[in-house]
Amino acid sequence: SQQGEEDPQALSIQEGENATMNCSYKTSINNLQWYRQNSGRGLVHLILIRSNEREKHSGRLRVTLDTSKKSSSLLITASRAADTASYFCATVTQGGSEKLVFGKGTKLTVNP
Amino acid sequence: EADIYQTPRYLVIGTGKKITLECSQTMGHDKMYWYQQDPGMELHLIHYSYGVNSTEKGDLSSESTVSRIRTEHFPLTLESARPSHTSQYLCASRRTGGKSEAFFGQGTRLTVV
């Protein structure tokens, strides 16, 4: 089974509102990453948080990581219509092979 | 900008044909990955490689095979395509290490008729 599980599966908000997406995972990780995908195209990396970090910011993005609960959240503040996309968390497993496994994703719609 | 390329972008092929999906990267990354994704659905890891001549199957069972003879090249082959193989296939690469993000190609949308 896949490593990460996101919730909600779909989220619809108005421009200017904040969007929060959550991700849970199952095994020990090296780091956790968030990606964005527009209309079924290739994914684009947004932000990475290492297993020894608890919070990270990048522009309007804020990511938290709780390794004791094996969960992470992505907050997008002051959302824009252009943020409409699918968002996926991904975990890099510990060990030499560094498998990169994705969750099911959250489909975010930001209404103008 | 990511230097990882997939060809073809779109492919429509008949049942029983052999196909190879190409993936190349010019970043010298040692880790490479193949994912299968149906529209609007999750990404399933089907193969990955952690270096030349080192490949592993992913979490989703797949009838495809891969090879990694050169660092920059990670082709995926289907010996006999079936309609159930219709999907989008995404290739990605990254460097080894705890701060390394993955770069994705634009994907190959495969339709088997």
Image: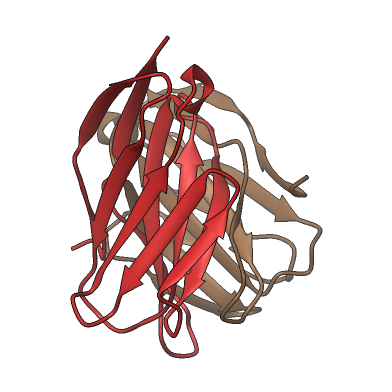
| x and y percentages locating residue B62 in the rendered image | 31, 55
Colour mapping used in the image: by chain
Can the viewer see residue B28 in this picture?
A: yes
Image position of B28 (left or right of A85): right
Q: Position of residue A26 (x, y in %)?
A: 20, 74
Q: Residue at x 55, y 38 (%)?
A: A42
Observer-nearest residue: B58 or A9?
A9
Please identify the residue farthest to the bottom as the structure is shown: A95
Image coordinates for residue A87, horizontal then vertical, percent: 39, 41
Toward which corner of the image does residue B40 lie, by quadrant?
top left
Occupied quadrant, residue A112: top left
Residue at the image point whose x is 26% and y is 65% from the top: A3
Colour assignment, chain B: brown
Q: Is residue B38 above or below residue A69?
A: above
- Give the answer, above or below, for where B2 lies relative to A111: below
Residue B113 location, x and y as percent?
34, 19
| The chain in red | A
Residue drawn where x is 81% and y is 58% of the image: B26
Q: As drawn, is B24 to the left or to the right of A91?
A: right
Residue furthest top as drawn? A112
Q: Quadrant of residue B93?
A: bottom right
Q: Is residue B46 at least partly visible in the picture? A: no
